């Protein structure tokens, strides 16, 4: 592995023997993490169980599209900050805005003028929304949207898209996952599910629970494009059955277009939630929507007040300044288009490398170019955590940290080319494992685990 230097590292070839690639300091730091922090990380998707055994790097710092671990290794990074760092680490425009506000104070007993400016900038960028309220994380925003839908409709049930992996840490969603311990069954029973892309099944669900469903909540797009007319059809179903349509734009926001998926596809939800890319790593999320709904959580109406969002740190000035800098950068520098161009180059290269090594049917690149993921299939064409482990080991040894292939705009052509080179080397080993019908000799430890599972 390469040590820190200002140039792109010339990593050694990824050979079958990766035992020389060791992370002793990271290994010790992971033990310290588990001693004090349940799970060893503050996000389950960052847990060391998501990486090959003893090859879970602990990060020292990052700049642009690269990160360094505490062992001195440098990586080209994908999926930065669980998709939150879309401009690259320590982006100068964002840092300048943050530093300026830090010198002026970060939190006050009354709203700051930055809250006004951030709201104006957000609503100008997402013109399908009429009001916005900021928070710190996506779970708070989606749960506030669900609460608001229940208050507005007087209905108890929530319908979530069954094909989307995550909406909130709160009981109404987590109770539907394998990690449901601690969630009362009575809460989970109020959450229903509908399949993505199937208007008939959704209509049947709304009819079966006529007058009981407060909202349909989904990511408007994920690893596949919405079928023609699907989102418009959902809009019509929601209107017909008197429920709200909520778009979770935590991932699609800014990556699909500057105004999110709703801006790209032209379908206006009642409420939508944003986060991740909004702050380029700084903690900020947003609930946005129609004025008549959002005002239910305000002061200028005569009805019962909805406890929408009330957070001590939701309007910290430096995070809102970061969000404004991000919105400006996306608009002025064409960031969404760049993400798509980089993703297209990467996807084309990875697919070609996999095909050349005879594993094109086993390593699959999926999703919109700005939000690429990969699937690892075994010799029978079935998803395999063991083959994912093999693939991740080779990527890490080659200096590529890639739980996904989600790009940031800080990547350049040399980064993409180097990634494709490492993928090709990894695919050569993948082919040997397929021929043996057993990747075990190349794993050097337990396989990586899915995030949502009942047993630790």
Image (cartoon, rainbow, N blue to C red):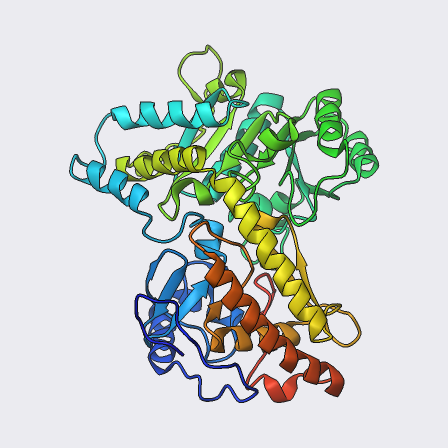
Q: Is residue 313 left or right of residue 303?
A: left
| Residue lying at 37% horizontally and 44% vertically, measured from the top left | 283
Res 40 → quadrant: bottom left
Q: Is residue 75 left or right of residue 416?
A: left
Residue 368 sits above or below residue 26 on the image: above
**Relative to residue 176, is residue 311 drawn left or right?**
left
Name the residue at 70% across, 29% down.
Answer: 212
Q: Nearer the viewer, residue 314 or 359?
A: 359
Establish if 205 lies above or below 119. below
> In the picture, which quadrant includes the C terminus?
bottom right
Q: Position of residue 315 (x, y in %)?
A: 32, 34
Residue at x-position 49% and y-position 58%: 413
**In this view, which residue lies farthest toward the left?**
103
Question: Residue 63 is drawn in which quadrant?
Answer: bottom left
Side of 214 relative to 337 (left or right):
right
Examine the image and state in which quarter residue 431 appears: bottom right
Nearest the viewer among 146 and 9 is: 9
Q: As drawn, which residue projects farthest toward the top? A: 302
Residue 362 appearing in the image: yes
Q: How many marks do you count on the picture? A: 0
- Residue 250 visible: no
The quarter of the rendered structure image containing the N terminus is bottom left
Locate residue 363, reporting x and y percent. Answer: 68, 68
Q: Nearer the viewer, residue 6 or 327?
A: 6
x and y, in percent, of residue 108 in the image? 21, 31
The structure residue drawn at horizontal position 46% and vertical position 77%, both measured from the top left corner, is 55
- What is the x, y in percent for residue 62? 34, 60
Query: Would you place residue 364 above or below residue 359 in this image?
Result: above
Task: Please state which of residues 9 and 22 is positioned toward the viewer in this rendering.
Answer: 9
């Amino acid at each position: 592995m390469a040590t820190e230097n200002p140039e792109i590292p010339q990593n050694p070839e990824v050979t079958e023997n990766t035992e020389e690639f060791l992370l002793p300091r990271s290994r010790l730091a992971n033990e310290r993490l588990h001693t004090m922090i349940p799970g060893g990380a503050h996000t389950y998707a960052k847990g060391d169980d998501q990486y090959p055994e003893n090859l879970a790097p602990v990060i020292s710092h990052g700049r642009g599209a690269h990160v360094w671990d505490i062992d001195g290794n440098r990586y080209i990074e994908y999926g930065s900050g669980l998709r939150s760092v879309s401009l690259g680490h320590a982006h100068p425009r964002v840092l300048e805005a943050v530093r300026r506000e830090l010198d002026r104070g970060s939190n006050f007993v009354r709203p700051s003028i930055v809250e006004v400016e951030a709201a104006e900038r957000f609503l100008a960028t997402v013109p399908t929304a009429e009001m916005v309220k900021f928070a710190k994380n996506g779970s708070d925003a989606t749960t506030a949207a669900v609460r608001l839908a229940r208050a507005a409709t007087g209905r108890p049930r929530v319908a979530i898209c069954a094909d989307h992996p995550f909406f909130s840490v709160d009981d109404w969603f987590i109770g539907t996952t394998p990690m449901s311990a601690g969630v009362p069954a009575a809460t989970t029973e109020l959450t229903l599910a509908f399949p993505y892309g199937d208007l008939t099944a959704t209509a049947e669900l709304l009819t079966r629970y006529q007058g009981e469903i407060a909202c349909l909540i989904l990511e408007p797009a994920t690893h596949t494009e919405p079928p023609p007319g699907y989102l418009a059809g959902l809009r019509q179903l929601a209107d017909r059955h008197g429920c709200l349509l909520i778009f979770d734009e935590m991932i699609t926001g800014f990556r699909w277009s500057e105004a999110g998926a709703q801006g790209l596809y032209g379908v206006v939800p009642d409420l939508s939630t944003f986060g991740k890319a909004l702050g380029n790593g700084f903690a900020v999320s947003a609930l946005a929507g129609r004025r008549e709904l959002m005002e239910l959580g305000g002061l200028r109406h005569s009805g019962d007040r909805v406890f929408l969002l009330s957070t001590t740190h939701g309007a910290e000035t430096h995070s809102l300044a970061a969000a404004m800098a991000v919105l400006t950068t996306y608009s002025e520098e064409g960031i969404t288009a760049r993400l798509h161009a980089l993703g297209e180059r990467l996807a084309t290269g990875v697919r070609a490398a996999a095909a050349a090594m005879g594993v094109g049917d086993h390593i699959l690149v999926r999703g919109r170019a700005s939000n690429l993921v990969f699937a690892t299939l075994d010799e029978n064409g079935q998803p395999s955590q063991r083959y994912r482990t093999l693939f991740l080991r080779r990527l890490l040894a080659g200096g590529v940290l890639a739980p996904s292939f989600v790009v940031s705009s800080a990547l350049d052509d040399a980064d993409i080319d180097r990634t494709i080179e490492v993928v090709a080397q990894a695919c050569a080993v993948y082919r040997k494992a397929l021929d043996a019908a057993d990747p075990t000799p190349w794993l050097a430890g337990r396989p990586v685990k899915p995030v949502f599972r009942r047993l630790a």
